[in-house]
Amino acid sequence: MKNIRNFCIIAHIDHGKSTLADRLLEFTKTISDRDMQAQVLDDMDLEREKGITIKSHAIQMNYTAKNGEQYTFNLIDTPGHVDFSYEVSRALAACEGALLLVDAAQGIQAQTISNLYLALDNDLEIIPVINKIDMAGAMIEEVKDQIIELIGVKDEDILLASGKSGIGIEEILEAIVHRIPAPKGDPQEPLQALIFDSVFNSFRGIIAYFRVYNGVLKKGDKIRFVNTGEEYEADEVGILKLGLEPRKEVTAGDVGYIITGIKNAKEVKVGDTITLANNPCKEAIKGFEEVKPMVFAGIFPVVTEDFEELRDCMDKLQLNDASLTYELETSQALGFGFRCGFLGMLHMEIIQERLEREFNQTVITTVPNVGFIAYDTKDKVITVNNPSEMPDPTKLERIEEPFIRAQIITKPEYIGNIMTLCLGKRGILLNQSYLTTTRVELMFELPLTEIVFDFYDKLKSQTRGYASFDYTPIGFRDSDIVKMDILLNSEKVDALSALIHRSRASDFGRKLCEKLKELLPRQQFLIAIQAAIGAKIVARENISAMRKDVTAKCYGGDISRKRKLLEKQKEGKKRMRQIGNVEVPQEAFLAVLKLDD
């Protein structure tokens, strides 16, 4: 066990985690030249296209150190985007150390700091590495000073490397051997293993990835999941190389996988403890905190008959992505579907893409919103994740919305732009401090509602990409939130309802009505599009009726003939408007997401 090292790589987005992982795999000959490709651990099409890591990936490497001893390394490559910080926290729970990567050209950014704090909370040994040192814009000394100030390490403890050209890879491997502690645990104790990830395989059922803390797990053992109490037989256990490599047993300190033939997604929970049925451990491992969704949106099948199929797909997807939460929901406009909780807008986009690609499901997504807490006049607490759950305004005492603390690191010349953006989003400036002469850190308190849609894109465009952004939730505060309904010919379309701050409501309503006017197809009758808060109409647009040219057959002759035909048509139109139904195309639901402020 003293020769096992479990570690992960943490960094801000695009600081080169996956590329460095490639070099480590190459250097330790874990992967043959034939199988080598860039970002080899990112095995999802989406990850390759977007150039981001979405899932954590575990892989085992063997390394012969300079002292001649053989070491086994379990590496977990983690995502960098703030929306996937839950994946990072799970990877950290299975490790003893972390490589903290900092881009030599970019320096320390917001996500670097938040991932570092996550690692320190888990008592991990941190090895700072400056990556991309061979780039033209590398500021090695400046970045060293930033790291020393942040973590308080010595200058000689900071490693210099380049994932692209392979500089400094051996030094990193030696540092892992000497600086990261070996896992603690006792193979003689009863089995105690933590599930940190799971995937669904349509042929073999659920494959759970785990880290053994105590004891030994052998093939054929009867095992028990502590939290669910279910018992199974271990059909296959093994370690994670580029594929799955079966072994007779996996012992304390190791990371491996187990296949038990489970088909039901609900029976495997990430963060659960595996133990032996006949010799259980005394207590479960303190696993991960429950995931807290930030953004809620409805996901509905385009054809209502596909609902059952969509439910199965959501179950399987939740296995691969434990941070997705969902519950049943019905909508008058869209039928049966799910109310889903996501960690952010990127997470929502990825889930939608994965449903379409991996499961061939075309879905409609409703307007995303955050969760509010409402108190009615009898002091009853109601959680509002959906506009339809909003209580009647007459019975509403107060409503609270979630706030976040945002940390923005940028260059001094963009401070003005960022201030304008954040204060326009109802933000409060907490403090402003210079990390170095060219880097300034701004701390804001902002309502989560305001940053959900397009805050990140706007921040990037206002600062020409030189700002990095990270946030943490800080609880709920009183706010003036109202429910805005969209009415088509006086009928509510519940899927287009939104919860919004009163100061923004009329502006948002007007823009939405204008957008819908462009998108809704014209009918034989007049369509009135209205935005309403309660009984008060705040915006209105009309789509005029298409009309047949009934006077085309009248050549010349008396005007009264034409008038008679037009009057007849007018009567018919009037009748039509009373009973006419308006079809809402899918683009209309998506348009709400793309409204520019």
Image: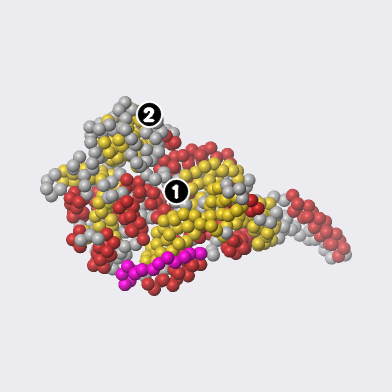
The amino acid pointed to by label 2 is Glu
Q: Is residue 427 magenta?
A: yes
Magenta stretch? 425-440
Q: Eyeballing the image, is 116 above or below 309?
A: below
First in sequence: mark 1 vs mark 2 = 2
Of all residues shown, which one is farthest toward the front?
Answer: 378
Percent of width and height locating residue 253: 25, 40
Q: Residue at x 46, y 54 (%)?
A: 475
Percent of width and height locating residue 200: 40, 38
For the question of whether residue 98 can be seen, the reply is yes
- The residue at which mark 1 appears reads as 292
Of all residues shown, which one is farthest toward the left?
Answer: 67
508 on left or right of 564 = left
Q: Eyeballing the image, is 332 above or below 401?
A: above
- The residue at which mark 2 appears reads as 231
**Label 1 environment density (alpha carbons within 10 Å; few <14, some 14–19, many ≥20):** some
- Secondary structure at badge 2 equals strand
558 on left or right of 365 = right
Q: CA distance from mark 1 to mark 2?
A: 29 Å
